[in-house]
Image: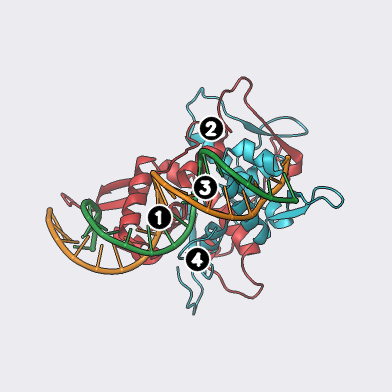
Chain colours: A cyan, B red, C green, D orange
Amino acid sequence: MARGVTHERAECPVARAVDVIGDRWSLLIVRDAFDGITRFSDFQRNLGLAKNILASRLRDLTAAGILEAVPAAEGSAYRKYTLTEKGRELFSLIVAIRQWGEEYLFEDQEPHSVLLDTEHERPLRRLEVVDSTGRALTSSGTFVRKVSHGDARS
Amino acid sequence: MARGVTHERAECPVARAVDVIGDRWSLLIVRDAFDGITRFSDFQRNLGLAKNILASRLRDLTAAGILEAVPAAEGSAYRKYTLTEKGRELFSLIVAIRQWGEEYLFEDQEPHSVLLDTEHERPLRRLEVVDSTGRALTSSGTFVRKVSHGDARS
DNA sequence: CCGTATCCATTCCGATACTG
DNA sequence: CAGTATCGGAATGGATACGG
Protein backbone atom coordinates (compact mmCIF):
# COMPACT_ATOMS: atom_id res chain seq x y z
CA MET A 1 0.00 0.00 0.00
CA ALA A 2 2.13 2.81 -1.19
CA ARG A 3 1.05 6.21 0.02
CA GLY A 4 2.23 9.65 0.97
CA VAL A 5 1.94 10.07 4.72
CA THR A 6 2.00 6.97 6.88
CA HIS A 7 1.28 6.12 10.48
CA GLU A 8 4.09 3.64 10.58
CA ARG A 9 5.62 5.24 13.64
CA ALA A 10 2.38 6.15 15.37
CA GLU A 11 2.08 5.30 19.03
CA CYS A 12 -1.48 4.14 18.47
CA PRO A 13 -1.83 0.51 17.41
CA VAL A 14 -5.01 1.32 15.57
CA ALA A 15 -3.20 3.81 13.39
CA ARG A 16 -0.41 1.41 12.55
CA ALA A 17 -2.87 -1.33 11.74
CA VAL A 18 -4.92 0.90 9.50
CA ASP A 19 -1.73 1.67 7.71
CA VAL A 20 -1.30 -1.99 6.87
CA ILE A 21 -4.82 -3.20 6.19
CA GLY A 22 -6.80 0.01 5.83
CA ASP A 23 -7.60 0.06 2.17
CA ARG A 24 -10.27 -1.19 -0.11
CA TRP A 25 -8.80 -4.57 -0.94
CA SER A 26 -6.38 -5.91 1.65
CA LEU A 27 -9.00 -7.04 4.11
CA LEU A 28 -11.05 -8.69 1.41
CA ILE A 29 -8.02 -10.61 0.25
CA VAL A 30 -7.46 -11.72 3.82
CA ARG A 31 -11.09 -12.73 4.06
CA ASP A 32 -10.74 -14.83 0.95
CA ALA A 33 -7.59 -16.37 2.34
CA PHE A 34 -9.56 -17.40 5.41
CA ASP A 35 -12.05 -19.00 3.06
CA GLY A 36 -9.30 -21.16 1.68
CA ILE A 37 -8.43 -19.28 -1.47
CA THR A 38 -4.75 -19.50 -2.33
CA ARG A 39 -4.41 -18.89 -6.04
CA PHE A 40 -3.95 -15.66 -7.90
CA SER A 41 -6.73 -16.24 -10.37
CA ASP A 42 -9.15 -17.33 -7.68
CA PHE A 43 -8.58 -14.14 -5.76
CA GLN A 44 -8.95 -12.23 -8.95
CA ARG A 45 -12.15 -13.84 -10.08
CA ASN A 46 -13.68 -13.72 -6.65
CA LEU A 47 -12.86 -10.09 -5.95
CA GLY A 48 -13.17 -8.75 -9.45
CA LEU A 49 -10.23 -6.41 -9.14
CA ALA A 50 -7.60 -5.63 -11.73
CA LYS A 51 -4.69 -8.01 -11.88
CA ASN A 52 -2.05 -5.38 -11.36
CA ILE A 53 -3.79 -4.19 -8.22
CA LEU A 54 -4.11 -7.73 -6.94
CA ALA A 55 -0.45 -8.39 -7.63
CA SER A 56 0.47 -5.23 -5.79
CA ARG A 57 -1.69 -6.07 -2.78
CA LEU A 58 -0.40 -9.64 -2.59
CA ARG A 59 3.11 -8.26 -2.63
CA ASP A 60 2.33 -5.79 0.12
CA LEU A 61 0.55 -8.32 2.32
CA THR A 62 3.40 -10.72 1.88
CA ALA A 63 5.93 -8.03 2.71
CA ALA A 64 3.87 -7.20 5.79
CA GLY A 65 4.10 -10.81 6.94
CA ILE A 66 0.37 -11.42 6.70
CA LEU A 67 0.53 -13.72 3.71
CA GLU A 68 3.19 -16.18 2.75
CA ALA A 69 3.93 -17.03 -0.87
CA VAL A 70 5.06 -20.60 -1.27
CA PRO A 71 5.69 -22.37 -4.59
CA ALA A 72 2.48 -23.94 -5.83
CA ALA A 73 4.32 -27.18 -6.55
CA GLU A 74 7.80 -28.60 -6.86
CA GLY A 75 9.80 -26.19 -8.89
CA SER A 76 6.73 -24.31 -10.00
CA ALA A 77 7.13 -20.66 -10.85
CA TYR A 78 3.66 -19.99 -9.47
CA ARG A 79 2.82 -19.39 -5.88
CA LYS A 80 0.27 -20.31 -3.30
CA TYR A 81 -0.69 -17.55 -0.92
CA THR A 82 -1.52 -18.61 2.60
CA LEU A 83 -1.99 -16.79 5.86
CA THR A 84 0.86 -16.63 8.30
CA GLU A 85 0.19 -16.71 12.01
CA LYS A 86 0.14 -12.92 11.96
CA GLY A 87 -2.47 -13.15 9.25
CA ARG A 88 -4.55 -15.80 10.98
CA GLU A 89 -4.66 -13.58 14.04
CA LEU A 90 -6.74 -11.17 12.01
CA PHE A 91 -9.62 -13.56 12.49
CA SER A 92 -11.17 -11.59 15.35
CA LEU A 93 -10.98 -8.51 13.23
CA ILE A 94 -12.73 -10.16 10.31
CA VAL A 95 -15.39 -11.50 12.62
CA ALA A 96 -15.87 -8.07 14.15
CA ILE A 97 -16.32 -6.45 10.77
CA ARG A 98 -18.61 -9.19 9.62
CA GLN A 99 -20.85 -8.98 12.65
CA TRP A 100 -21.10 -5.23 12.42
CA GLY A 101 -21.88 -5.44 8.73
CA GLU A 102 -24.53 -8.08 9.25
CA GLU A 103 -26.25 -5.96 11.83
CA TYR A 104 -26.12 -2.56 10.20
CA LEU A 105 -25.64 -2.91 6.49
CA PHE A 106 -28.42 -5.30 5.53
CA GLU A 107 -32.13 -4.96 5.50
CA ASP A 108 -34.00 -7.21 7.86
CA GLN A 109 -34.90 -9.81 5.28
CA GLU A 110 -31.92 -9.30 3.05
CA PRO A 111 -29.79 -12.42 2.67
CA HIS A 112 -26.08 -12.42 3.30
CA SER A 113 -23.35 -14.99 3.65
CA VAL A 114 -22.91 -16.34 7.17
CA LEU A 115 -19.99 -17.58 9.16
CA LEU A 116 -20.75 -20.87 10.90
CA ASP A 117 -18.82 -23.08 13.25
CA THR A 118 -17.99 -26.42 11.68
CA GLU A 119 -19.20 -28.51 14.57
CA HIS A 120 -22.76 -27.24 14.97
CA GLU A 121 -23.14 -25.29 11.74
CA ARG A 122 -24.51 -22.43 13.72
CA PRO A 123 -23.65 -18.72 13.65
CA LEU A 124 -21.02 -17.60 16.10
CA ARG A 125 -21.79 -15.73 19.24
CA ARG A 126 -21.41 -11.97 19.09
CA LEU A 127 -17.97 -10.75 20.06
CA GLU A 128 -17.79 -9.25 23.50
CA VAL A 129 -15.33 -6.74 24.83
CA VAL A 130 -14.48 -7.72 28.39
CA ASP A 131 -12.20 -6.32 31.07
CA SER A 132 -9.46 -8.22 32.86
CA THR A 133 -11.98 -9.76 35.24
CA GLY A 134 -14.22 -10.95 32.44
CA ARG A 135 -16.89 -8.31 32.75
CA ALA A 136 -18.47 -7.00 29.55
CA LEU A 137 -17.62 -3.44 28.60
CA THR A 138 -18.84 -0.77 26.28
CA SER A 139 -16.63 2.04 25.08
CA SER A 140 -17.80 4.28 27.90
CA GLY A 141 -16.24 1.95 30.41
CA THR A 142 -12.82 2.42 28.88
CA PHE A 143 -10.26 5.09 28.17
CA VAL A 144 -7.01 5.36 26.28
CA ARG A 145 -3.77 6.06 28.10
CA LYS A 146 -1.20 7.64 25.85
CA VAL A 147 2.44 6.79 26.34
CA SER A 148 4.15 9.00 28.85
CA HIS A 149 7.02 10.84 27.14
CA GLY A 150 6.16 9.89 23.61
CA ASP A 151 7.38 11.99 20.75
CA ALA A 152 5.29 9.84 18.48
CA ARG A 153 2.62 11.34 16.32
CA SER A 154 -1.07 10.63 16.66
CA MET B 1 -15.86 7.64 0.44
CA ALA B 2 -16.53 8.21 -3.18
CA ARG B 3 -15.07 5.60 -5.46
CA GLY B 4 -15.54 3.78 -8.71
CA VAL B 5 -16.59 0.22 -7.99
CA THR B 6 -18.40 -0.48 -4.75
CA HIS B 7 -19.42 -3.54 -2.80
CA GLU B 8 -22.60 -1.89 -1.71
CA ARG B 9 -24.70 -4.77 -2.94
CA ALA B 10 -22.32 -7.55 -1.98
CA GLU B 11 -23.77 -10.50 -0.16
CA CYS B 12 -20.77 -10.56 2.14
CA PRO B 13 -21.06 -8.31 5.18
CA VAL B 14 -17.30 -7.89 5.27
CA ALA B 15 -17.31 -6.46 1.78
CA ARG B 16 -20.09 -4.00 2.54
CA ALA B 17 -18.38 -2.92 5.72
CA VAL B 18 -15.06 -2.40 3.99
CA ASP B 19 -16.94 -0.22 1.59
CA VAL B 20 -18.00 2.06 4.41
CA ILE B 21 -14.98 2.14 6.70
CA GLY B 22 -12.23 0.63 4.59
CA ASP B 23 -10.05 3.59 3.91
CA ARG B 24 -7.15 5.34 5.49
CA TRP B 25 -9.06 7.81 7.64
CA SER B 26 -12.57 6.73 8.53
CA LEU B 27 -11.57 4.29 11.22
CA LEU B 28 -9.16 6.73 12.77
CA ILE B 29 -11.88 9.33 12.92
CA VAL B 30 -14.11 6.80 14.63
CA ARG B 31 -11.30 5.96 17.03
CA ASP B 32 -10.96 9.63 17.91
CA ALA B 33 -14.70 9.88 18.37
CA PHE B 34 -14.50 7.03 20.87
CA ASP B 35 -11.82 9.03 22.64
CA GLY B 36 -14.27 11.86 23.06
CA ILE B 37 -13.26 14.13 20.24
CA THR B 38 -16.18 15.99 18.74
CA ARG B 39 -14.82 19.09 17.07
CA PHE B 40 -13.59 19.58 13.56
CA SER B 41 -10.35 21.24 14.54
CA ASP B 42 -9.60 18.63 17.17
CA PHE B 43 -9.98 15.85 14.65
CA GLN B 44 -7.85 17.80 12.28
CA ARG B 45 -5.06 18.54 14.68
CA ASN B 46 -5.05 15.06 16.10
CA LEU B 47 -5.04 13.26 12.78
CA GLY B 48 -3.02 15.73 10.79
CA LEU B 49 -5.07 15.32 7.66
CA ALA B 50 -6.12 18.00 5.22
CA LYS B 51 -9.26 19.89 6.07
CA ASN B 52 -11.02 19.10 2.85
CA ILE B 53 -10.44 15.40 3.34
CA LEU B 54 -11.64 15.58 6.92
CA ALA B 55 -14.74 17.46 5.86
CA SER B 56 -15.40 14.86 3.21
CA ARG B 57 -14.95 11.95 5.62
CA LEU B 58 -17.14 13.55 8.28
CA ARG B 59 -19.81 14.02 5.65
CA ASP B 60 -19.54 10.42 4.53
CA LEU B 61 -19.55 8.99 8.03
CA THR B 62 -22.55 11.12 8.88
CA ALA B 63 -24.34 10.03 5.74
CA ALA B 64 -23.54 6.44 6.65
CA GLY B 65 -25.20 6.92 10.03
CA ILE B 66 -22.02 6.33 11.97
CA LEU B 67 -21.62 9.89 13.15
CA GLU B 68 -24.24 12.44 13.99
CA ALA B 69 -23.67 16.14 13.48
CA VAL B 70 -25.51 18.20 16.06
CA PRO B 71 -25.23 21.98 16.47
CA ALA B 72 -22.36 22.80 18.81
CA ALA B 73 -24.57 25.22 20.71
CA GLU B 74 -27.88 27.01 20.48
CA GLY B 75 -28.19 28.39 17.02
CA SER B 76 -24.56 27.75 16.28
CA ALA B 77 -23.59 27.14 12.70
CA TYR B 78 -20.91 24.75 13.87
CA ARG B 79 -21.39 21.12 14.65
CA LYS B 80 -20.42 18.55 17.16
CA TYR B 81 -19.75 15.09 15.78
CA THR B 82 -20.73 12.21 17.98
CA LEU B 83 -21.11 8.51 17.43
CA THR B 84 -24.53 7.09 16.79
CA GLU B 85 -25.45 3.67 18.10
CA LYS B 86 -24.33 2.23 14.78
CA GLY B 87 -21.03 3.97 15.31
CA ARG B 88 -20.65 2.90 18.91
CA GLU B 89 -21.15 -0.67 17.81
CA LEU B 90 -17.86 -0.41 15.99
CA PHE B 91 -16.21 -0.70 19.37
CA SER B 92 -15.44 -4.40 19.02
CA LEU B 93 -13.87 -3.69 15.68
CA ILE B 94 -11.66 -0.96 17.06
CA VAL B 95 -10.63 -3.21 19.92
CA ALA B 96 -9.85 -6.03 17.49
CA ILE B 97 -7.68 -3.80 15.36
CA ARG B 98 -5.96 -2.36 18.38
CA GLN B 99 -5.16 -5.74 19.88
CA TRP B 100 -3.81 -7.06 16.62
CA GLY B 101 -1.71 -3.96 16.14
CA GLU B 102 -0.35 -4.14 19.66
CA GLU B 103 0.72 -7.69 19.15
CA TYR B 104 2.18 -7.56 15.68
CA LEU B 105 3.15 -4.02 14.84
CA PHE B 106 5.31 -3.03 17.79
CA GLU B 107 8.67 -4.18 18.97
CA ASP B 108 8.73 -5.88 22.32
CA GLN B 109 9.81 -2.86 24.28
CA GLU B 110 8.25 -0.27 22.07
CA PRO B 111 5.68 1.88 23.86
CA HIS B 112 2.18 2.35 22.56
CA SER B 113 -1.06 3.81 23.81
CA VAL B 114 -3.21 1.36 25.74
CA LEU B 115 -6.92 0.91 26.18
CA LEU B 116 -7.86 0.45 29.84
CA ASP B 117 -11.10 -0.20 31.63
CA THR B 118 -12.13 2.69 33.81
CA GLU B 119 -12.81 0.64 36.89
CA HIS B 120 -9.50 -1.19 37.30
CA GLU B 121 -7.34 0.78 34.90
CA ARG B 122 -6.13 -2.46 33.44
CA PRO B 123 -5.84 -3.61 29.82
CA LEU B 124 -8.80 -5.47 28.42
CA ARG B 125 -8.87 -9.17 27.91
CA ARG B 126 -8.07 -10.38 24.43
CA LEU B 127 -11.14 -10.76 22.22
CA GLU B 128 -12.25 -14.31 21.75
CA VAL B 129 -14.24 -15.76 18.90
CA VAL B 130 -16.67 -18.27 20.35
CA ASP B 131 -19.33 -20.54 18.90
CA SER B 132 -22.96 -20.60 19.95
CA THR B 133 -22.16 -22.76 22.93
CA GLY B 134 -19.41 -20.47 24.14
CA ARG B 135 -16.47 -22.53 22.98
CA ALA B 136 -13.44 -20.68 21.62
CA LEU B 137 -12.83 -21.00 17.90
CA THR B 138 -10.09 -20.32 15.42
CA SER B 139 -10.76 -19.75 11.76
CA SER B 140 -10.23 -23.42 11.00
CA GLY B 141 -13.25 -24.29 13.08
CA THR B 142 -15.49 -22.18 10.91
CA PHE B 143 -16.70 -21.87 7.35
CA VAL B 144 -18.71 -19.43 5.31
CA ARG B 145 -22.07 -20.39 3.89
CA LYS B 146 -22.98 -18.30 0.88
CA VAL B 147 -26.57 -17.40 0.28
CA SER B 148 -28.45 -19.97 -1.70
CA HIS B 149 -29.67 -18.42 -4.95
CA GLY B 150 -27.73 -15.21 -4.76
CA ASP B 151 -27.01 -13.26 -7.86
CA ALA B 152 -24.96 -10.91 -5.74
CA ARG B 153 -21.34 -10.31 -6.46
CA SER B 154 -18.54 -11.40 -4.16
C1' DC C 1 -13.15 28.69 14.98
C1' DC C 2 -15.51 25.94 11.23
C1' DG C 3 -15.59 24.81 7.38
C1' DT C 4 -15.71 25.39 1.73
C1' DA C 5 -13.26 26.06 -2.66
C1' DT C 6 -9.50 25.57 -5.61
C1' DC C 7 -5.17 23.84 -7.31
C1' DC C 8 -1.89 20.31 -7.83
C1' DA C 9 0.84 16.05 -7.11
C1' DT C 10 0.41 11.40 -6.17
C1' DT C 11 -1.86 7.24 -5.98
C1' DC C 12 -5.53 3.99 -7.02
C1' DC C 13 -7.67 1.20 -10.04
C1' DG C 14 -9.49 -0.78 -14.34
C1' DA C 15 -8.58 -2.19 -19.11
C1' DT C 16 -5.69 -4.00 -22.16
C1' DA C 17 -1.70 -6.04 -24.06
C1' DC C 18 2.05 -9.03 -23.40
C1' DT C 19 5.41 -12.76 -21.51
C1' DG C 20 6.54 -17.37 -19.62
C1' DC D 1 -2.52 -20.04 -15.43
C1' DA D 2 0.27 -16.41 -13.22
C1' DG D 3 1.71 -12.67 -13.44
C1' DT D 4 4.22 -7.89 -15.57
C1' DA D 5 3.91 -3.49 -18.29
C1' DT D 6 1.66 0.43 -19.67
C1' DC D 7 -1.97 3.74 -20.22
C1' DG D 8 -5.59 6.85 -18.74
C1' DG D 9 -9.27 8.33 -15.87
C1' DA D 10 -10.80 8.92 -11.29
C1' DA D 11 -10.07 9.70 -6.57
C1' DT D 12 -6.97 10.70 -2.67
C1' DG D 13 -4.70 13.93 -0.09
C1' DG D 14 -1.91 18.22 1.01
C1' DA D 15 -1.59 23.29 0.82
C1' DT D 16 -3.50 27.41 0.58
C1' DA D 17 -6.91 30.87 0.14
C1' DC D 18 -11.29 32.37 1.31
C1' DG D 19 -15.93 33.21 3.83
C1' DG D 20 -19.47 32.55 7.83
Q: Chain of mark 4?
A: A
Residue pictured at 43% horizontal, 52% vertical:
B26
Disc ID at residue B33: 1
Q: Which residue is mark 2?
A: B10
Which element type, helix, strand or loop, lies under badge 4? loop
Assess whether mark 2 and mark 3 are in contact (beta carbons under 8 angstroms): no
Residue pictured at 74% horizontal, 49% vertical:
A82
Whether residue A55 is visible, yes or no, is yes
A130 in relation to B152, above or below: below
Residue pictured at 51% horizontal, 35% vertical:
A103
Q: Few, some or many C-alpha atoms within 10 Å of disc 3 (few <14, some 14-19, many ≥20)?
A: some
Same chain, marks 3 and 2? no
Q: Which residue is mark 3?
A: A24
Same chain, marks 4 and 1? no
Q: Amino acid at mark 1?
A: Ala
Q: Alpha carbon of mark 1 to alpha carbon of mark 3: how far?
A: 22 Å
Name the one closer to the observer, A2 or D19.
Answer: A2
Same chain, marks 1 and 2? yes
Q: Residue furthest bottom?
A: A149
Q: Position of residue B119 (x, y in %)?
A: 52, 60
Whether residue A132 is visible, yes or no, is no
Q: Chain of mark 2?
A: B
Q: Chain of mark 1?
A: B
Q: Which of labels 4 and 1 is toward the front?
A: 4
Q: Amino acid at mark 3?
A: Arg
Q: Amino acid at mark 2?
A: Ala
Residue pictured at 78% horizontal, 33% vertical:
A119
Q: Position of residue B141 (x, y in %)?
A: 76, 40
The quarter holding residue C1 reads bottom left
A140 vs A34, left or right, is left
Same chain, marks 1 and 3? no
Name the one closer to the observer, B20 or A133.
Answer: B20
